[in-house]
């Protein structure tokens, strides 16, 4: 891809401005605004649809390459106290995860100038090292001489006595079973009075490299209890530090003692010393993680903060690409609510950068609201799990040539991460952000892990199937996003007769669930036209709302949080799946996640509930024995029920008066019953044997004339356009939407 971009926001109102950040490999590129309607190029569907929007954006722009500065670290701006250290002690606990990968800064005041500097590093050999540099540029290095082992806690310390010219480094394993080959204490003579004035900022988990421009944040692993002293500590005092002996007296010469357990939602890093050397975390390293002294007795970081005084840094963290804006778009007052994009083109290459135009706050323009699941888009943002051959085999996509799509090639080349991917040290990614290119949130994009590796639309491009159907059928509707719903609550939904959710609204915050429940209890209506919705506990950072968090445990997913790290750092609430907090989706929409598979879909068969006169409106124009969705689909080739499936379950909260309208069964063993309900390891969890591998379509009424219609399949919307929109999936969807968007009493 010769040109890529992103926006400073996803949702924008008429009268507001949205900025576009672009990186281009050529001297210039062209940009224009389009309204997106259908993004799937599959010849079996209606084809790609867009409408040109005349705007001041249209034109040619100067190209420039904008790079990624990945890796997390803490930055402490230089202060007079840091400029005049002549002797020092650096102390911390560290848990390196890739100690032999490359040079890694632990605590440094190290730069690219020929001046005084110091730093505690993991050196190129994977050993602890203290580097000291004088004003003449010469470097003294003291190394432990012992390799650091990965995934092992160490007490580490380095001292320098400027008057005596003595420096030391110490590393000692913190574990019941100590590795004698890894402990080390090295002390030797070095030059006296090396340290002079130091103009560099201080960094934790990073340093400035003499040969490169900018910060090198290459540390992988945890750092706990970082401290600096303005004197060389004798061994007995270091022993007390290692034993964490507490005293009311402030240790002599304490320059900084950073508290990593405080304000875990924030980028502010507090210093408990009198110096108040407050730091700022960059690129959101993982907070609320277990420290060197975690006992396992408490799993909530708020209840035992002294055991969570650690931060997990990664060399590939990225929550803000930090690109400069190239142009902006002032949204006209009369621009219709919908899905739009800036179309970037250059020399045979292109990129679409989507955004969503919502109605003005408090100014709904239709009875129908289409809720675009942007939290879910961001959870999947740049997902590339198929790089792992084992995952390709698991998904039945072993024959797939991956990456092959231009977007996937770019994502893999730049290692842009989703909440489904792993960091380079193997830990799961728990934060995601919209301030970077999101290459799979694009029209024309297919998710290659489904349909036996052939791929088909998923998330954003799949939701355009639904948007296209609404346009083709002539419905008036407003578009809003998950972020709008999270921040504005019930006042946003109240004007609408019906809220339509797309193919896969999987990631929901507590505020969103509360709002939807209140909306339905107050007479609102919902059409849930997807599968595996309302599943993962998702939190939005209160200070940096472009960043979202998920802690995976207790559900079906690509990684699991480590023990003791199940609580979300942004809000302090228990993460995982909502069902483990008693918020079963069945309670709200009648159905919940039951199975997933990646090969072939199936049609629905009508159930007795569909013949009840109270549900007859759903099936007007559909034959008694007619299979629903028994024809080609744009998602996994054929059938309206597939990919991820939801089922009714009265024990999990499906309302007793719910009508079971139709069920899809007969899936292959590529479809597996969800992990969270599988308490034994056996060979009977597949679609050919397990009765819960099914998709249920339901309808039920809420108080005050509210109601819910749910289909239980991600693939449903992929069947809407078959036969020029003249099919029973389209007919059923239209029957329900006509009834739900009217003022008529629901049966």
Image (cartoon, rainbow, N blue to C red):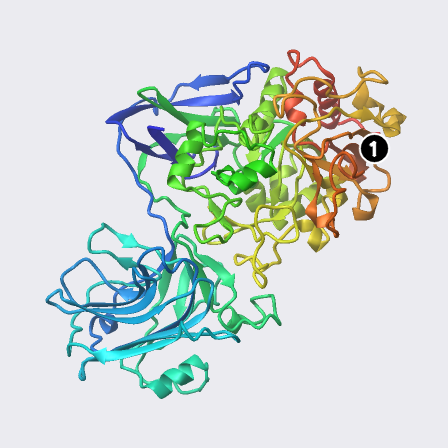
Label 1 packing within 10 angstroms: few (<14), some (14-19), many (20+):
many
In-image side of 360 versus 630 (left or right): left
Q: Quadrant of residue 435?
A: top left
Q: Position of residue 450 (x, y in %)?
A: 59, 31
In-image side of 126 versus 693 (left or right): left
What is the count of numbered marks?
1
The residue that mark 1 highlights is 660
Judge by depth and name the residue closer to the eye, 721 or 636.
636
Task: Pick the quarter of the image with the C terminus.
Answer: top right
Residue 537 visible in image: yes
In-image side of 361 versus 733 (left or right): left
Q: Position of residue 32 (x, y in %)?
A: 37, 22
Q: Residue at x 80, y 15 (%)?
A: 621
Q: Position of residue 446 (x, y in %)?
A: 52, 27
Q: Residue at x 40, y 40 (%)?
A: 436
Residue furthest front as drawn: 181
Q: Position of residue 350 (x, y in %)?
A: 38, 24
């Amino acid at each position: 891809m010769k040109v890529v971009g992103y926006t400073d926001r996803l949702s924008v109102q008429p009268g507001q401005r949205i900025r576009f950040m672009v990186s281009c490999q050529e001297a210039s590129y062209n940009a224009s605004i389009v309204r997106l309607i259908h993004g799937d190029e599959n010849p079996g569907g209606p084809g790609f649809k867009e409408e040109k929007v005349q705007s001041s954006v249209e034109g040619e722009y100067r190209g420039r390459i904008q790079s990624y500065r990945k890796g997390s670290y803490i930055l402490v701006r230089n202060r007079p106290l840091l400029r005049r250290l002549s002797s020092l002690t650096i102390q911390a606990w560290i848990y390196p995860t890739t100690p032999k990968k490359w040079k890694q800064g632990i605590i440094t005041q190290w730069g690219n100038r020929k001046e005084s500097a110091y730093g505690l590093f993991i050196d190129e050999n994977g050993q602890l090292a203290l580097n000291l540099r004088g004003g003449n540029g010469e470097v003294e290095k003291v190394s432990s001489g012992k390799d650091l082992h990965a995934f092992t806690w160490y007490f580490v310390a380095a001292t320098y006595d400027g008057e005596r010219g003595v420096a030391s480094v110490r590393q000692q394993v913190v574990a019941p079973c100590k590795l004698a080959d890894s402990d080390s204490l090295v002390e030797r003579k070095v030059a006296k009075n090396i340290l002079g004035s130091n103009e560099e900022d201080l960094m934790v988990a990073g340093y400035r490299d003499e040969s490169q421009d900018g910060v090198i944040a290459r540390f992988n692993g945890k750092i706990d209890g970082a401290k600096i002293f303005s004197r060389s500590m004798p061994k007995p005092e270091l022993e007390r530090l290692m034993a964490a002996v507490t005293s009311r007296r402030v240790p002599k010469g304490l320059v900084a003692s950073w508290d990593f357990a405080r304000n875990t939602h924030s980028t502010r890093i507090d210093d408990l010393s009198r110096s108040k050397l407050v730091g700022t975390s960059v690129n959101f390293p993982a907070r609320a993680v277990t420290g060197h002294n975690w006992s396992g007795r408490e799993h909530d970081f708020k209840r035992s903060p002294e055991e969570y005084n650690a931060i997990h840094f990664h060399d590939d963290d990225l929550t803000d690409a930090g690109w400069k804006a190239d142009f902006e778009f002032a949204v006209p007052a009369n621009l219709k609510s919908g899905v739009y994009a800036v179309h970037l083109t250059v020399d045979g290459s292109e990129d679409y950068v989507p955004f969503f135009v919502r109605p003005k706050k408090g100014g709904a323009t239709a009875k129908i609201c289409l809720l675009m699941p942007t939290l879910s888009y961001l959870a999947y943002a740049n997902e590339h799990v198929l790089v792992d051959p084992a995952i390709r085999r698991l998904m039945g996509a072993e024959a797939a040539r991956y990456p092959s799509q231009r977007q996937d090639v770019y994502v893999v080349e730049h290692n842009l991460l989703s909440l489904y991917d792993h960091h380079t040290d193997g830990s799961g990614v728990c934060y995601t952000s919209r301030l970077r290119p999101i290459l799979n949130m694009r029209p024309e994009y297919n998710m290659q892990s489904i349909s036996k590796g052939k791929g088909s639309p998923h998330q954003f491009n799949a939701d355009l199937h639904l948007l296209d159907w609404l346009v083709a059928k002539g419905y008036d509707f407003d578009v809003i996003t998950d972020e709008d719903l999270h921040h504005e609550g019930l006042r946003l939904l109240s004007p609408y007769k019906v809220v339509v959710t797309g193919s896969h609204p999987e990631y929901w915050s507590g505020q969103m669930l509360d709002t939807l429940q209140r909306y339905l209890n107050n007479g609102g209506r919902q059409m849930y036209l997807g599968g595996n919705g309302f599943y993962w506990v998702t939190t939005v950072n209160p200070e940096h709302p472009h960043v979202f968090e998920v802690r995976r445990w207790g559900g079906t997913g690509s990684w699991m949080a480590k023990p003791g790290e199940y609580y979300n750092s942004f809000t302090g609430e228990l993460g995982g799946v909502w069902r483990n907090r008693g918020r079963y989706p069945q309670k709200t929409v009648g159905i919940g996640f039951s199975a997933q598979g990646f090969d072939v879909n199936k049609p629905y068969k009508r159930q007795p509930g569909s013949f009840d006169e109270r549900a007859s409106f759903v099936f007007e124009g559909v034959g008694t024995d007619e299979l629903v969705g028994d024809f080609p689909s744009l998602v996994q080739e054929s059938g309206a029920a597939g990919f991820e499936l939801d089922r009714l379950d009265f024990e999990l909260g499906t309302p007793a008066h719910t009508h079971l309208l139709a069920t899809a069964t007969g899936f292959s063993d590529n479809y597996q019953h969800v992990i969270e309900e599988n308490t034994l390891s056996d060979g009977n969890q597949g679609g050919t044997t397990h009765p819960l591998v099914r998709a249920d379509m339901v309808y039920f009424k809420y108080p005050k004339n509210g109601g819910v219609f749910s289909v239980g399949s991600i693939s449903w919307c992929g069947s809407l356009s078959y036969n020029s929109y003249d099919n029973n999936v389209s007919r059923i969807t239209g029957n329900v939407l006509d009834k739900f968007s009217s003022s008529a009493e629901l049966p």
